[in-house]
Image (spheres, helix red, strand yellow):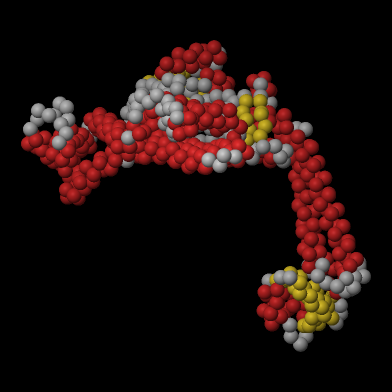
């Protein structure tokens, strides 16, 4: 267990006119976590922040139009200090307007193409000699319109639409669709359109009246529509290519502006945390105790007038948490953070999580072959599956996987497992076995239960220490009772039911063990009564059964470990039977075919087993660390220490 880095609370008063210079100095130190100290915001800062966010949205919009999956953006310190929002605006807005204009053209063309395609799809069913003008004609006495829909709506549409004054001039039913040319009195135009829309049918829109009137018949119209679709599609493709060309030529400076705007927005957000007085600005925040002298030295070198005070944090405050774990252990912070960031005032359980998680994972995978292949895949290919391999979280996660598989490799070597019993099954050989629990499931289950007993009681012991520090009498009594019931009860149960004497307890009479168990049960009942009153007189049972359930949960270590071994064992056995059948045929060619088939099957089945063992080992290790261990004593309700800093390079993920 580690204590997070000790922090001190600092207050820095500076003249209002140099506050941005001071903020830049603090950013270069990368050791100051700034807190919000006031809600009043300077209108100019708000305007600049909104303008920066608007420009950042424009830059991201343009970057996505490049159709690249990601770009590597970088920015020098000199460029960062020389750029201004006005500078960015002058370059970005014209390109944004150009691309937006082209996008508007594309949308208009896509609308044209959609209308032409829909009309072409319907008119294909009509005879080629039908006058094109009848598709949408509006005369003084009579008018006509083309209507189309699905065949299953034909009867319902006929009843809804046709009467003595509305009649069909043409009808074509093809496949699952139908097309009508409907003739009606012109004064019924509005009524006819309402009926068509109510029936959910397609009809030729008004904007196509001029188009249909230009052609003598459907054949000429369809030829023009086909040409129109092809022509518009080419125009759309050309415009998109023009957008890509315009943006790709600007990717480098767009990436620089992206980083500049992100930094500027961060600056402005931090500036708005300053409490602005008439002539002074106040910065409040947290600095690692060991780095305070460095912060003071930077401020002195800056030449900015300032007044700085600092003090130790008070118990009623909630400082941010900066974890302090050594290299190797620190990688497992990503596992701890999945549960929650430790509170500043509580222990950081990352070291215990690291040892537990790696041990559990190794015990469940426990195979030289699987862990070796997993290590190769992680080291050679995992980077190619992520969009940002430089991410701190990804590097930690990768290190966790490597550590877990190294432990699995060691356990595999100790138990002599290589793809289950592959060497023994096919070559009559075997790795030396220092540990033999793979061949004795009951031994493995017993070991798992002992591990569970130790791990669960370690969490209860930590809870007891925590309750004593917090002076929580009820919780302390409960934890003493839970530990005491096990200390006296387990030797008693083993003696009475299994005839086994636990060392150190063999000299104690059974009556003493029974009395100790009863007294500790009483402590559990008393603690529950103090918290829940009368209800606690019944709930104490669940405290004891809960411990039993937690310990039994560790049988999954044996379950997953044995499943990994025996699945591989079964695959080896089945494929060996197949290979023996081919070998028994006496045909060399058939034997060669059998060897090749066996190799393919072995590869596929062991890859499946590898995937299952890795997934099972990871998930169940998380389960044991979170539910059976951390949930007893760890709150995880803190928030991370996030210092001011400059971002001069970053992989920008676009899709």
From the top left corner, tell me how far across and down residue 483 is, in percent: 20, 34
Name the side, left or right, on which 374 lies relative to 366.
Answer: right
Give x and y (percent) for residue 405: 46, 29
> Could you tell me residue 114's position as x and y percent?
77, 59
**Could you tell me if residue 231 is visible in this image?**
yes
Residue nearest the viewer, comparing 541 with 29: 541
**20 or 514, nearer to the observer:** 514
Say which residue appears at 52% left-offset and 15% top-offset.
299
Name which residue lies at 9% across and 35% down: 510
| Number of on-image labels | 0
Instruction: Check the image and report above or below for 170 versus 611.
Output: below
Quarter of the image where the N terminus is located: top left
Residue at 22 percent of width and 42 percent of height: 544
Answer left or right for 398 relative to 589: left
Asked whether residue 596 appears in the rendered view, the answer is: no
Q: Where is residue 616 in the image (x, y as percent from the top left)?
A: 43, 39
Give the answer, above or below, for where 58 lies relative to 176: above
Quarter residue 409 falls in: top left
Quadrant of the image for the C terminus? Answer: top right
Q: Quadrant of residue 494?
A: top left
- Judged from this view, the residue extending furthest toward the bottom is 164
Tell me what residue is drawn at x 39 percent, y 28 percent: 415
- In the image, residue 246 sits, relative to residue 74, either above or below, namely below
């Amino acid at each position: 267990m580690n204590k997070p880095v000790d922090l001190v609370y600092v207050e820095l008063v500076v003249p209002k006119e140099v506050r941005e210079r001071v903020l830049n100095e603090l950013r270069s130190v990368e050791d100051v976590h700034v807190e919000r100290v006031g809600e009043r915001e300077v209108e100019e800062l708000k305007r600049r922040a909104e303008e920066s966010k608007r420009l950042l949205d424009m830059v991201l919009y343009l970057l996505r139009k490049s159709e690249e999956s990601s770009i590597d953006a970088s920015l020098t310190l000199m460029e960062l200090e020389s750029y201004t929002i006005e500078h960015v605006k002058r370059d970005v807005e014209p390109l944004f307007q150009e691309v937006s204009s082209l996008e508007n053209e594309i949308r208009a063309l896509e609308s044209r193409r959609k209308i032409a395609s829909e009309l072409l799809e319907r008119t294909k069913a009509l005879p080629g000699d039908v006058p094109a003008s009848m598709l949408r004609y509006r005369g003084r006495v009579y008018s006509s319109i083309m209507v189309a829909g699905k065949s299953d709506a034909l009867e319902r549409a006929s009843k809804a639409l046709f009467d003595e004054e509305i009649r069909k001039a043409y009808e074509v039913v093809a496949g699952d669709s139908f097309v009508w040319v409907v003739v009606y009195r012109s004064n019924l135009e509005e009524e006819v359109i309402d009926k068509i829309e109510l029936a959910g049918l397609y009809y030729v829109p008004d904007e196509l009246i001029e188009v249909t009137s230009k052609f003598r018949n459907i054949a000429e119209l369809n030829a023009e529509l086909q040409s129109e679709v092809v022509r518009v599609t080419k125009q759309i493709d050309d415009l998109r290519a023009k957008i890509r060309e315009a943006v790709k030529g600007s990717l480098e400076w767009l990436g620089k502006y992206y980083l500049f705007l992100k930094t500027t927005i961060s600056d402005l957000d931090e500036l708005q945390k300053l409490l602005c007085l008439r002539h002074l600005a106040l910065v409040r925040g947290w600095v690692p105790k060991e780095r305070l002298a460095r912060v003071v030295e930077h401020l002195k070198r800056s030449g900015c007038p300032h007044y700085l005070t600092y003090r130790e944090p008070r118990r009623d405050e909630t400082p941010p948490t900066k974890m302090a774990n050594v290299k190797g252990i620190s990688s497992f912070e990503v596992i701890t953070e999945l549960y929650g960031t430790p509170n500043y005032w509580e222990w950081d359980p990352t070291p215990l999580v690291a040892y537990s998680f790696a041990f559990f994972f190794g015990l469940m995978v426990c195979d030289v072959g699987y862990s070796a292949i997993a290590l190769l895949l992680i080291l050679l290919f995992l980077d190619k599956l992520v969009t940002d391999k430089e991410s701190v979280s990804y590097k930690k996660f990768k290190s966790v996987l490597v550590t877990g598989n190294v432990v699995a490799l060691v356990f595999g070597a100790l138990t002599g497992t290589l793809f289950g019993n592959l060497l023994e099954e096919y070559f009559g050989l075997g790795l030396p076995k220092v540990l033999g629990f793979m061949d004795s499931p009951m031994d493995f289950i017993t070991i798992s239960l002992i591990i569970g007993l130790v791990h669960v009681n370690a969490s209860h012991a930590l809870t007891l220490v925590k309750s004593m520090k917090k002076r929580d009498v009820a919780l302390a009594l409960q934890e003493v009772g839970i530990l005491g019931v096990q200390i006296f009860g387990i030797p008693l149960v083993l003696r009475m039911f299994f005839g086994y004497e636990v060392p150190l307890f063999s000299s104690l009479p059974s009556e003493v063990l029974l009395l100790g168990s009863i007294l500790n049960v009483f402590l559990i009942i008393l603690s529950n009564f103090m918290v829940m009153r009368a209800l606690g007189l019944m709930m104490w049972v669940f405290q004891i059964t809960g411990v039993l359930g937690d310990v039994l949960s560790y049988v999954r270590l044996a379950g997953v470990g044995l499943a990994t071994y025996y699945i591989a064992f079964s695959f080896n056995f089945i494929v060996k039977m197949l290979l023996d059948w081919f070998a028994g045929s006496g045909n060399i060619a058939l034997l060669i075919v059998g060897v090749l088939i066996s190799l393919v099957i072995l590869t596929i089945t062991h890859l499946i087993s590898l995937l299952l063992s890795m997934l099972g080992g990871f998930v169940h290790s998380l389960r044991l660390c979170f539910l059976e261990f951390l949930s007893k004593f760890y709150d995880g309700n803190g928030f991370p220490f996030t210092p001011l800093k400059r971002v001069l390079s970053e992989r920008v993920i676009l899709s």
